[in-house]
Image (cartoon, rainbow, N blue to C red):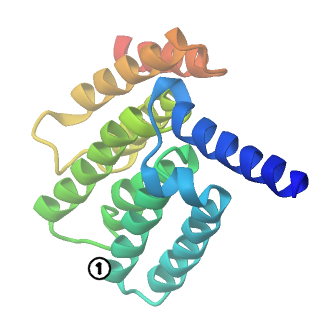
Amino acid sequence: MRGRRVGAFLCLAGAYLSFALPGTAGKPKPLFQRLLGPLTELAADVQWIRFQRARIRGENERALFFAEGALSLDPESTAGWELLARHLALYLSSPERETDPQRRRAWFRAGLEVTRRGKQKAAEPARLDLLRGLLFLTKAQLDPDPFSEGERELLEEARRAFAAARLAGIFGAEDLENYVAEELSR
């Protein structure tokens, strides 16, 4: 009988702590995450596998649905935010995939929006600053045409993003910031 009471007490104490302890960076975790714990990460991984399969089959709408589902299950996954942002801003907005410059710009902006959303929820938000800089730098070098602001403004945005990543202590961000500054001085 005593063992059951101790077990019940431990269960209640664990439940209390899972509700009382905050998530990453003081953000409270959603109720379903606190109740299911590691199972939500597993469910998110399954959604990412579905995302990859749909992406490979060319089912972009379905892939985006699975990616959003994975991020809702595991919003602290920095890698998840990075994957979705790269998919939108580099893959879907590439000239090889999309010939219409207006649509390429829209896909690119959607990828940037994912980095903004991810910074609010991801466990390592500064990595999204680094990615944001890489996205701007890539567009400036490979596909600046759809942007009225042109290559120079894309490089300025990259420099600002790399500066934010540097200030957050991301390794390599300073070198990238210096590289972009040299490109801008030409």
Dot 1 lies on which element?
helix
Whether residue 83 can be seen here: no
User: Callout 1 environment at 10 Å: few (<14), some (14 to 19), or many (20+)?
Assistant: few
Q: Residue at x 68, y 43 (%)?
A: 14
Instruction: Give the quadrant of the N terminus.
Output: bottom right
Q: Is residue 33 visible?
A: yes
Query: Label 1 is placed on what type of residue?
Result: Glu
**Above-or-below relation of 185 to 106:** above
Q: Is residue 30 left or right of residue 174?
A: left
Left or right placement of residue 32 versus residue 98 in this view: right
Q: Nearer the viewer, residue 21 or 16?
A: 16
Residue 88, x across and y down, in percent: 35, 60
- Give x and y (percent) for residue 35: 55, 56
Q: Could you tell me how many numbered marks the image carries?
A: 1
Seen in the picture, residue 145 relative to 91 is either above or below; the reply is above
Q: Residue furthest front?
A: 1
Residue 28 % position (x, y): 45, 35
Quadrant assignment, res 163: top left
Camera-side residue of 86 and 146: 86
Q: Taking 99 as reference, is 84 left or right?
A: right
Quadrant of the image occupied by residue 141: top left
Determine which quarter of the picture holds residue 116: top left
> Compared with residue 90, is residue 58 higher up or lower down, i.e. above or below?
below
- The quarter of the rendered structure image containing the C terminus is top left
Q: Is residue 105 above or below residue 183?
A: below
x and y, in percent, of residue 177 in the image: 49, 16
Identify the residue under disc 1: 61
Measuring 30% from the left and 21% from the top, which residue is drawn there?
156
Q: Is residue 152 left or right of residue 46?
A: left
Q: Residue at x 60, y 14 (%)?
A: 169
